[in-house]
Image (tube, rainbow, N blue to C red):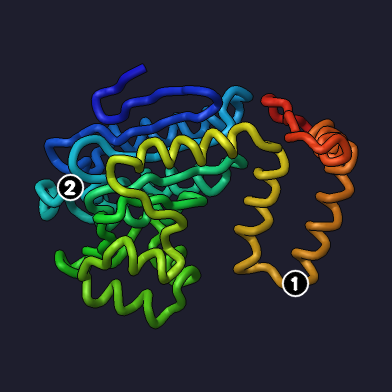
Amino acid sequence: MENEHVIVKLTDGVLSLQLNRPESLNAFSPEMILRLTEEIKAAGSNPEVGAVILSGAGRSFSAGGDVKTMGQAGPSETYDHIGKLNELVLAMHALEKPIIAAVHGFAAGAAFNLALASDLIVAAEDSKFVMSFAQVGLISDGGGLYFLTRLVGPYRAKELFFKAEPITAEQAKEWGIVNHLYPLAELEQGAFGLAARLAAGPSRTFGLMKKIADQANTAGLPEILEQERITQAMLVTTEDHLEGVAAFKEKRKPDFKKKQEVL
């Protein structure tokens, strides 16, 4: 299934969402943001989807906001546009399935933040990340001031926001932004291999771990301990848990069922 601004594929439980405006380095468009939001929301109720990959066609992951259209929108239009972007970020945050951003070329501005809204980031060794907002006199949007600050701390985050200079993929990995690096020719295969592994895993378990881990930045220890306690009590009767225990005892790999369980 193909759309002008997003290419959508579902293979072996992995939903691939590829940004598809290569002539503009996959700069965001309203159509692109809307389609991504629709697909992410639909993935939540589709038992055939176990994991999601976000990637970009052509030379780069994405340049973020479309600079060619900047300076033309007023406050009302900007407010509405950012609201649509926020809806996408919140849908990604709410999806109880792993999302992997596969970055090559540049991840700039809001595209950097789209990657940060994912659960894991894999990148080509020669890719670069840049919080480019200050270059055009804007603040970060799309959750960057939330995600990056919590990930690298306020001082490093403010340096990236203020200086608006690219950092290498290697530096991003050293700072904990990127999980894995691959040669460019191996990025697609590496990302899919990781996503397929997650898609074949205990999907309900992954979803609940994601949900609780994302709350750990704002919740206190007692709240997280209680959530762990309640969730674990629910999971011990699931088929995935029983299969995992049986596989361990029988010294084989677990064969988790593909369809998500409803607790």
Residue bearing the label numbered 1? 221
The residue at 43%/52% (across/down) is 121
Q: What is the quadrant of the C terminus in the image?
A: top right
Query: Residue at the location (48% across, 22% down)?
Result: 11
Image location (x, y in percent) of residue 52: 49, 36
Q: Position of residue 55 (x, y in %)?
A: 34, 39
Q: Position of residue 87 (x, y in %)?
A: 44, 44
Location of residue 138 (image quadrant):
bottom left
Disc 1 crowd, CA 10 A, few/some/many (<14, 14-19, 20+):
few
Horizontal relation, residue 166 to residue 187: left or right: left
* Mark 1 → mark 2, Cα distance in angstroms: 41 Å
x 50%, y 48%: residue: 90
Under mark 1, the amino acid is: Leu
- Residue 204 showing in the rendered view: yes
Q: Is residue 39 left or right of residue 29?
A: right
**Disc 2 residue type?**
Asp
Query: Which residue has dot 2 on it?
Result: 66
Judged left or right of residue 158, residue 66 is left
Total number of numbered discs in the rendering? 2
Residue 153, x across and y down, in percent: 46, 77
Q: Residues within 10 Å of mark 2 (few under 14, many from 20)?
A: some
Q: Secondary structure at mark 1?
A: helix
Residue 76: give its label. Answer: none
Write down the quadrant of residue 199 in the picture: top right
Report the mark closest to the observer, 1 or 2: 1
Could one spot residue 82 in this view of the protein?
no
Q: Relative to residue 230, is residue 108 drawn left or right?
A: left
Q: Identify the secondary structure beneath mark 2.
A: loop
Residue extending furthest bottom?
Answer: 155
